[in-house]
Amino acid sequence: MSTSYSPVVGGDGSSRLDPREARQPLLPSLDRPASPRFLQDRFRRPYQLRQYVMPCIGVSFLALFLFLTVNSTLHPPPVGPGRRTALELATGNILSDLQGDSIVWDRLAEMTDLFGPRISGGESLERSIDWMMTMMTQEDNLMVWTEKVQVDVWERNEESLELLLPSRPPVPLPMLGLGGSVATAGGNGSIEAEVLVVQDVEELMKLGNETISGKIVLFDDDNWKHYGDSVKSRVYGAREAERFGAVGVLVRSVTPFSLGVPHAGSMLGANIPAAAITVEDSQYIRRVWERHGKADHSASPFAHLFEIPKGATSRNIIAEIPGRSRPEDIIVLGGHIDSWDVGTGAMDDAAGFFAAWHALRAISHLKEPPLRTIRVVGWVAEERGQFGAKAYAKKHAAEIPHHIFAMESDTGVFQPWGLSVTGSEEAVDYLSAAGQHYLGHIGAGNITSSDSSGADVAPLCQEGVPCASFLSLDPITQESPLDSGLDGYFYYHHTRADTVAALKPKELALASAAMGIWAYLVAEMVQSLPRDDKADA
Amino acid sequence: MSTSYSPVVGGDGSSRLDPREARQPLLPSLDRPASPRFLQDRFRRPYQLRQYVMPCIGVSFLALFLFLTVNSTLHPPPVGPGRRTALELATGNILSDLQGDSIVWDRLAEMTDLFGPRISGGESLERSIDWMMTMMTQEDNLMVWTEKVQVDVWERNEESLELLLPSRPPVPLPMLGLGGSVATAGGNGSIEAEVLVVQDVEELMKLGNETISGKIVLFDDDNWKHYGDSVKSRVYGAREAERFGAVGVLVRSVTPFSLGVPHAGSMLGANIPAAAITVEDSQYIRRVWERHGKADHSASPFAHLFEIPKGATSRNIIAEIPGRSRPEDIIVLGGHIDSWDVGTGAMDDAAGFFAAWHALRAISHLKEPPLRTIRVVGWVAEERGQFGAKAYAKKHAAEIPHHIFAMESDTGVFQPWGLSVTGSEEAVDYLSAAGQHYLGHIGAGNITSSDSSGADVAPLCQEGVPCASFLSLDPITQESPLDSGLDGYFYYHHTRADTVAALKPKELALASAAMGIWAYLVAEMVQSLPRDDKADA
Ligand SMILES: [Zn+2]
Ligand SMILES: [Zn+2]
C-alpha cells in the first residue's frame, strides 16, 4: 500500500504558524526531539486536530512564545535544538553545488559514449568501472575502492527470428533473446514451429499438453497495468511453457508504449529458448492466429544465442565520506553499474549511480563531513540477478546492524519527486517531515511507503535497515510516480532507446542534489532513523 | 496562414436562437441561399455583431417568425430551401453506417498483415491492390477499376552502418538508406570516412571544400519546429554535400520524438549515398565530434544498397458512385496506396485510402446516389514522387474543369478534426459553415485554410480545384492539429512502428464517416463549390 502525506511545513524552510500546531509544543519536553510517533499523529490526523484546535484559535501569547522557542525541535526534527541553521546551510550548499551544473549528465554521456552498454561479464563494463574509478579518485578526490563480485556471464551472439506466412516472404522480426535464455539446439540449430498465442501464464495453465506440446508459445499480455504485473510472462513464461512441452517462447515486450523496439530482460531458468518481440509484432501474430485459427510458423528464433558456461569476476564500486562523530553508522545510497546489452544503459542504471556519486561529491565539498558515514555503492550485475547486492551484503554482514538507511535509484533519474520508503512507520514519518521541510521547495520532498524495496538494497532491508527507492516524475507525462506508475520510464527500459538522450542535464543535477540532501539529513539525525522491528524479528 | 472559425450553429444540427442572428434573416432574400461572402462576415465578426444586436434583444415576434422560416436557407447553405431534412438524414446515415463498426480497421489490419509494406514496384503492393480490388468489387459491390501508372523502382537490399571508435568495438547503428539513394561504389563497396557534423544545409554552405571534401556529412538538425522545416536536410542534404566533395551523407531522423528507430524518406538525386540514422545516434555522433574536435569513422554506410535501373508498372485504384443528376461533376477523395518498405504503411497511407473507400461504401448504402459523382482514388507511388497523382491528372485532364472538390488524407487517420482547405475564400467559408453544422457534434467540422495542399491532390489544386487535407487530432496528445503541428503522427512516420497498431478502430470508423459526410455535402450543393480563380488564371 502507498501513502502520501500533505505538507505541513512551508517549502521555503520557514515554519508556517498553523493553528493546529500552536498547541503542540506543549506536549513534548524541550530536551529531546519530538518522537516519530508524535509526528506520525500530526501528519496522519490533521483534520481531527483541526477540529480540536479551531475553537482555541485565540491562542495566548505564552503559547505562541513557547511554540516559537521549541518549534525547531519539532518539525522536522532531524537533530537537537540549535542545529536548524547549520542543516539548512549544508543542504542549501549541496543544492547549489549541483544545480545549474551539467557535470552529471556530461560525465554520463562521456562514459556511455566511450564504452557503450555494460552487460555483466563483458569488457565494456570493466572499462567503464576503470573510468569511473579514475574520475572519482583523480578528479573528485573521493575515498573509493572496488570489491570483487563473482558474476554469471550470459552473452548475446547473433540471433534472428522470422515469421513464415503463406501471403508474404519471411518476415524478419526484431527480437531480443531474454537474459539467461538457452540457445536453440546447443547454439547451432534453429526452431521452426507453429505459434500458440496466450494472454499470460494463467491462460497457459488452462491448456493441456496436446495443445502446447511442440509449439512456440507467444505470451501476448495486452493488459498493461504496471511493470510488476506485466513482467510475469517474461519471467515465468518459459519455465511454465516448458513443462507442457513447448519448444520455445516469445514474449510481448513489457512496456506501455512502443515504437517498434523490443525490450530485453531476464527470465527464470528453462531449457527452451525465450525472446522478447515488439508490442506491434506480438499483436500481429495474435491477429494472424485469431484470424486463421492457428498460428503460422516462427522460424530460427534464436540461432546462435548462447550462454558461456562459466562465470567471471567483476566489481562493486564503493566510495564514502567517513562520519565526523559516528563513523561506524552508515548511510548507503547508489544504483547498479551494469546494464543490458542494448542502448547504453545510461538510464538503467548508470544515471542512478551517477546521481549518488555526484551527491557524495557535493557533500565532500561541505565545510565538515556529516555526523555519520555516507557511502555510495555501485552494485554490479543487478540485471543478471543482483550478484553485486548479494556480495555487498555478505562482505559487509558485520556492518549491517550499523546501516542506518539504504537508498537506491533504479527507476530513472528525471525531475526528482521523493522517496518510496520501506521500513517502520516512524522512519516513514520522519522522512516525510524532513522531506517537506528541506526538499519541498524543489518538489522533491514527497514520501510514499511501500512493502517492496528496490532489488539492490533488498538484502539490507530484509535485515531491518530502513530503505528507500528514489523516485522522479514520469519523464513523458511529468505526472507524479503515484499517478503514472512510472510508465514513461518503461518506454525506454531495456531497449536501444536507453541512452543519455533519454535524460536531461538539469533534472539529473537536481535529482543528484536531492539524493545528497536525503542522505545528509539522515546522516545528521541526533537519534538514528528507527529500524524496522518486524524485519529484525 | 491558418484561420479557424468559432461555431455559431449548434452541434446537434438544431439552430440556437442567437440574438446576433435574429436580425440577419432580413438581409438576404428568401429565394436564394446566403452568399458565402455574407457567411464570411458572420463568422469573422461575431463581436461587432453582438454589440450591434444586444440593445435590440427584445426582438419582435415578427422578426423571430421570419428568422425561423428562413434560417434553414442560411446556415449552412449547401443547397436550396427544403433540402435540410434530407441532407441531415443522409449524413446521419453515413455516420451510423460506420460508427461502432470496426470494419475499416479490421480490413486494414488484414491487408497489411497479409502483405506487409507496399513499396512502389514491389510485389506486395500489387498483391495488396489485387486484394483491395477483390474486396471493393465482390464484398462491397462498388464500381471499381484500375489505371496503369509507370513508376520508378528503388529497392533496399542489405545495408549496414558502423561507427568506429577507439574506445569500443565497432558500433552497429540502425539505419535506413534514403529513398532514391545510390549505393556505395556501385553496390559492392563500402565507405570509411571521418564524419563532419553540421546542423543543416545552411551551416554546410558556410564551410569550404577543404573541410567537407572526403567526409561523411551528418546533418544533425536538433531544432524541431515542424516536419516541413526539419525535412530539408533529408531532401537537399546529399545534393548539396556532394557539391563540396562529401563521400556520403547521414541524416538525423525527422521526428519530434524517438525511441531508437530510424525514419525513412525520400531525397533529391545525388551521386553519393545517403541514409537516415536515429535521433539518439545522431546526437551521439555529434557529442563525440564536439568532444574530440573531429569525428570518428563511419564505415560501410550503405553496403549493397542499390537502385534497380528500370521502371515498373503499377496501378491507381478508382472507385465511384455516379451522380444522380450531375454525373459529370466529380468530387474526389482518397489517399495513397503505396508506402515505404518499413513497418506496414498502415498509417501512411493505407488508412487514408481505407477511410475514403469505406466512406464511399457507406454512401453506396444510401437510398439514392448523391447529386454529383463521388470518386475515390488510391494514388500509387506517392512516396517515390507522386507518380500516381501525375498519372491521374494526365489521364483525367479533360475532366479536371469538372472536378468540384479534391480531398486527400495523408497525415494519419485518428480522431477526426476537420479539413485544411486550399482554395477560394468562398470555398473556405462554405465548408466552414457546413462543417460546423453537419460535423460539429462529433468535433470533426473544423476548417483551417492553407496555401499548400496535399501532394496527391496538388496537380488538381493547381488547376483551380478547391482542395482539402483531411486532419485528425494529434494521436499522442489529442491536441488540435493547429496546436500540435501533427507531431504525434511523426512519431510513427516512415518507421517500423507504422503498423495498424498505431491506429484505433473507433477513430478510423469516425474519420471515415466524416470524410464521407464532407464529400456528400459538397456533392449535394445546389451551386458548385467556387473554384480558385487565382489558380485558374
Ligand atoms: Zn535497473
Ligand atoms: Zn504519405
Image (spheres, coloured by chain):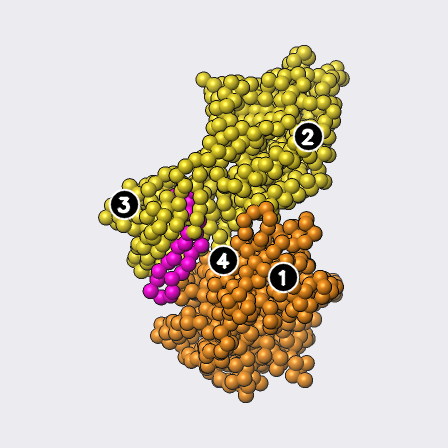
Chain colours: A yellow, B orange
Residue nearest the observer in this picture, B192 or B114: B192
Which chain is mark 3 on? Answer: A
Q: What separation in Å lies between label 3 and label 1 (alpha carbons)?
A: 52 Å
Residue at (55%, 56%) from the top-left corner?
Answer: B162
Which residue type does callout 1 highlight?
Ile
Chain letter for mark 2 = A
x and y percent of residue A79 in the render? 67, 19
- Marks 3/2 in contact by CB < 8 Å: the verdict is no
Q: Which residue is mark 1?
A: B216
Specify the quadrant that holds the C terminus of chain A.
top left
Task: Please give the chain letter of the residue carrying mark 1.
Answer: B
Residue B74 in the image, given as x and y percentages of width and height:
61, 73
The amino acid pointed to by label 3 is Gly
Foreground pick, A516 / B513: A516
Q: Which range of residues does the magenta coloring cover?
A: A159-181
Residue A379 falls left or right of residue A290 = right
Residue at 42% x, 79% y: name it. B144
Q: Which residue is mark 3?
A: A245
**What residue is at 34 percent from the left and 46 percent from the top?**
A186
Q: Residues within 10 Å of mark 3 (few under 14, many from 20)?
A: some
Secondary structure, magenta segment, majority class = loop
In the rendered structure, which amino acid carries the disc numbered 4? Ala
Query: Above or below — where is B445 with respect to A272?
Result: below
